[in-house]
Amino acid sequence: MRAGLFAILAWIAPPVAGQEPAALATIPSLAALEAAGAVIGKISINTHDVFDLDDPKENNWLFRAANWLHVRTRPETLRHQLLFSSGERLSVRVIQETERLLRGNSFLYEAAIRPIAWHDGVVDLEVRTRDSWSLQIGASVSYAGGTTSGGASLEDDNLFGTGVRLSIASRGNSAVSTAGGTRRGVDTSVSYPFAFDGHTSLAYSQSKISDGSSKTAAVNRPFYALDSRWAAGASSAKDSRLVDSYAGGAIAARYRRLLESADATYGWSPGLVGGWVHRFSTGVRYEQTAYQAEPGLAAPAQLPAGRTLVAPYLRYDALQDEFREVSNLNQIGRPEYLLLGWNSSLVFGRASAGLGSTQTVSQYSCSLSKGAHIAAEGTLLSSVSLSGERSEGRSDRQVLSAATRYYKRRADTTLYYLSLTGDATNFSDATRYLSLGGDTGLRGYPANYQLGARRVLFTAERRFYTDWYPFRLIRVGGAVFYDIGRAWSGPYEKPSGNDWSSDFGFGLRLLSSRSSSGSTLHVDFAFPLEREPGVKSFQFSFKSKTGF
């Protein structure tokens, strides 16, 4: 009797501020709704501005002005991405995958899907999102490994709330010099990922740099979801730029590389079956490469040989549906998704003279990755990949890479990170090399400190994630680290500094949490443990990266 009276009072009384309405509180969970065979009814899409003015910490004149200037994401932009529709049976897996896809949009700060009404076997759903600030105007500069790069840019990841991305940027890099000095350039790109059926991406970009230019155009309808049944795409690219040739670790000559390529592909899949996705694709790739001496610059004794390849290919992908949502791993205070299941790919193509190729070449590539839980709060991610060619009875242009990364959480705000990576190349024309120093590892040494055809790098970090949230705009973290590595072998091997080198250091991490760029500013001090003449006692670097 008393329980029934309380239920009646809860039904007729207005909800208290800060509590959910009684009707919402009585809606079953998504899992219970799926078990009951619920059918999806009305789907509401509620987009919200960058800042929550209902939160007293964000209700100020600056954030109100930012919301006024910001163009909120249009509901139809998000509706294109939903993997479910009205009249379908509710599936928890599909809703979770949709949330994962929505959170993958750089212009969204957060996204959630929840039931808001339940009646006569029909459940109404709400898609609730909050925008990130998508318009970026400014200048950037980074310094790492003794080299400076930077520029000015104007970009918007969500133009007028449509999901269109537009970017115009100027850049310069003191690490790459040309006959006229530092390499400078202007990059322009535009893309729209929700064309036609809402899952087709259109993209165009071009770069004009002081020593060349490039253009790319692509239309691609990918396997956008685990249960996607087909995919198709086409792309083309042209590129002209100077290439450095090294001797003894120093630039000895320069020459121009001209590249034209095109690709067309079609794929099909039975969808998600038994927790696995199998995808089959076929296509054809065209590639023409030419090399030439550059007037006024020292050329190598022998230029690499140019070639034309027309190669039909087959591709097979297998993916295990096993994702895990985490936080404070490679981002600060943002949800991340780890693929712990198997993920593999195999591609084989063959170019022949009968199709217009200048030589007969078999091209291949394969990759494999897997994640696993190791003890309590430990995660291990491993991957390996191999690509190359075989022609005239020998292998060439091979690249072998392997990586293992281990994350061990000690507390909500502390994590240990270990990384071991290795790479090996085999290019008979010496057009590719591996380096260590600066951005490529060994943070205590200058860029290109070690060069070679083999490379190994081990990194250990203790990462700190704080609750400090200055101005509700920046997430703050830090790290102490140790690196040890070596690059060796091949024509580019440095006679000095080609033994094992190591460093230690500490750094600050600043994540721009409300910006669609999602970039993290790294400010590091690194100290080399094996010094030789010309190596400073410490390296100071600051640069933007996409992860911790």
Image: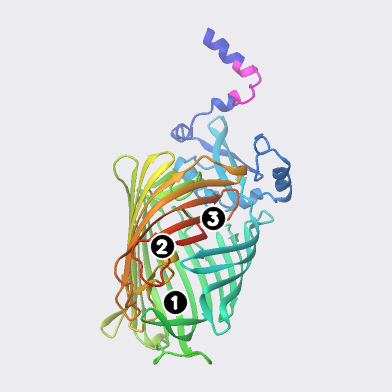
**Of circles 1 and 3, which is in front?**
3
Location of residue 349 by image quarter: bottom left
Mark sitting on residue 332: none
Circle 3 crowding by C-alpha within 10 Å: few under 14, some 14–19, many from 20: some
**Position of residue 47 measured from the top left corner of the image (x, y, whole percent):** 64, 44
Circle 1 crowding by C-alpha within 10 Å: few under 14, some 14–19, many from 20: many
Visible residue check, residue 332 = yes
Q: Earlier in the sequence, mark 1 or mark 2?
A: 1
Asked if residue 97 lies left or right of residue 514, the reply is: left
Asked if residue 505 lies left or right of residue 43, the reply is: left
Q: Say if mark 1 contacts mark 3, CB within 8 Å.
A: no
Q: Is residue 148 magenta?
A: no
Residue sticking out furthest to the top: 1
Q: Earlier in the sequence, mark 1 or mark 3?
A: 1
Residue identified by numbered label 2: 444
Residue identified by numbered label 3: 519
Alpha carbons under labels 3 and 2: distance apart:
22 Å
The amino acid at mark 3 is Ser
**Position of residue 248 measured from the top left corner of the image (x, y, whole percent):** 36, 81
**Position of residue 183 measured from the top left corner of the image (x, y, whole percent):** 56, 77
Q: Secondary structure at mark 3?
A: loop
Residue lying at 41% horizontally and 49% vertically, measured from the top left: 338
Most foreground residue, 241 or 191: 241
Mark sitting on residue 285: 1
Above or below, comparing residue 229 to residue 428 in the picture: above
